Image (cartoon, rainbow, N blue to C red):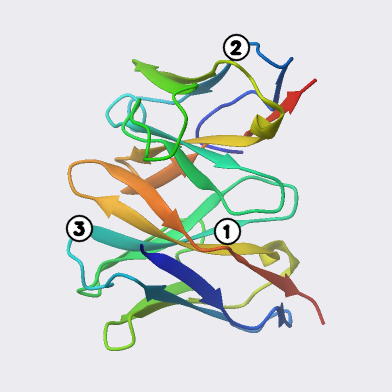
Amino acid sequence: QVQLQESGPGLVKPSETLSLTCTVSGGSVSSGSYYWSWIRQPPGKGLEWIGYIYYSGSTNYNPSLKSRVSISVDTSKNQFSLKLSSVTAADTAVYYCARLAATRYYYMDVWGKGTTVTVSS
Amino acid sequence: QSVLTQPPSASGTPGQRVTISCSGSSSNIGSNTVNWYQQLPGTAPKLLIYVNNQRPSGVPDRFSGSKSGTSASLAISGLQSEDEADYYCAAWDDSLNGPVFGGGTKLTVL
């Protein structure tokens, strides 16, 4: 079955850029039925959608983060990636990648285990 | 401040039936289907209910969902200790062209 795995630095300095990669196994990011998403969860808080990408490269971002976010896809490596610039302590969170089913209905059916990113000097 | 509104907490005793509500607006729940996610302590969210009332393979039929207008509910019957978790509702938002979540409900099994 499809599995997602996040990877990247666990510690990022304030004002720098957070970079994470999600590797997809057991399936293909080139599947036309899905968007590939990033979601985050600050400590003790709820879930926040960051953005998603289609295999073609088209993206959509949460307006609250849009000026700082970039999501890209590498179909040859079956991966998609997140970059969040100018980070502050408020960006400390567990970051999840997820597959977003997007045919007639929308729902995130497969999630990665998450990776903790701390913003601190 | 989450776009969808859930009660922060709920509780019940083993065997009881509990419900968790989720309220939204015409741009999300009012015009799209609702999904529910279960997050056990220290783990990633897991899809529990999709398209209002559908259960993925492996989810017990003790879990059920419903939707009416701009609100939705998750019901858990025959409550078990292993159901103690955070539950999140979510729906597509046409204004955002993306998903929105509720703030989560922490379910305690007494």
Depth check, front residue: B54 or A60 = B54
Q: Regarding mark 2 in the picture, which secondary structure is present there?
A: loop
Residue at the top extreme, as displayed: B16
If the image is split into quadrants, where does the C terminus of chain A sit? bottom right
Res A67 seen here: no
- At x 27%, y 82%, the residue is A75
Q: CA distance from mark 1 to mark 2?
A: 31 Å
Q: Regarding mark 1 in the picture, which secondary structure is present there?
A: strand
Question: Residue B55 occupies which quadrant of the picture?
Answer: top left
- At x 22%, y 73%, the residue is A30
Q: Amino acid at mark 3?
A: Ser
Tell me: residue A106, above or below residue B74: below
- At x 26%, y 67%, the residue is A54
Tell me: residue A23, above or below residue B108: below
If the image is split into quadrants, where does the N terminus of chain A sit? bottom left
Q: Numbered disc 2: what chain?
A: B
Q: CA distance from mark 2 to mark 3?
A: 36 Å
| Residue on which the image places disc 3 | A33
Q: Amino acid at mark 2?
A: Arg
Can you give x and y, in whole percent of width and height, for residue A103 in the image? 19, 48
Q: Is residue A16 left or right of residue A7?
A: right
Q: Nearer the viewer, mark 1 or mark 2?
A: 2
Q: Numbered disc 1: what chain?
A: A
Res B44 seen here: yes
Q: Residues within 10 Å of mark 2 (few under 14, many from 20)?
A: some
| Residue on which the image places disc 2 | B17
Tell me: residue B81, above or below residue B110: below
| Residue on which the image places disc 1 | A40
Answer with mark 3 or mark 1, whichever residue precedes in sequence: 3
Can you give x and y, in whole percent of width and height, for residue B9 in the image? 71, 25
